[in-house]
Image (tube, rainbow, N blue to C red):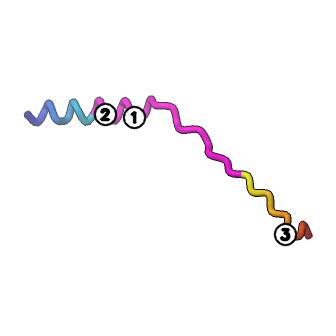
Amino acid sequence: MASTDSEIKDEISTRSKNDQPPMYKVILHNDDYTSME
């Protein structure tokens, strides 16, 4: 049973390393009240 548990953990860690990272989430905030100085 111990060998099966380690095989499952190895498979999960390998799968997570090969996944693409999520794209950036960009929020633009246009502030008309703050000066640019």
Circle 1 sits on which residue? 16
- Which residue, given by chain and number where applicable, does mark 3 sit on? 33
In the image, what residue occupies the spot 89% across and 70% down?
35
Q: Is residue 22 magenta?
A: yes
Q: Amino acid at mark 2?
A: Ile
In the picture as drawn, the residue positioned furthest to the front comes out as: 32
Residue at the right extreme, as displayed: 37
- On the image, the x and y values in percent for residue 6 come to 20, 35
Residue 28, x across and y down, in percent = 73, 52
- Using the rendered view, name the quadrant where residue 4 is placed: top left
Residue type at numbered disc 3: Tyr
Horizontally, residue 12 falls left or right of residue 31, namely left
Would you name the residue on which mark 2 appears?
12
Magenta highlight on residue 18: yes
Q: Cβ–Cβ below 8 Å for labels 2 and 1?
A: yes
Query: Image quarter for residue 31?
Result: bottom right
Magenta stretch: give its range.
10-27
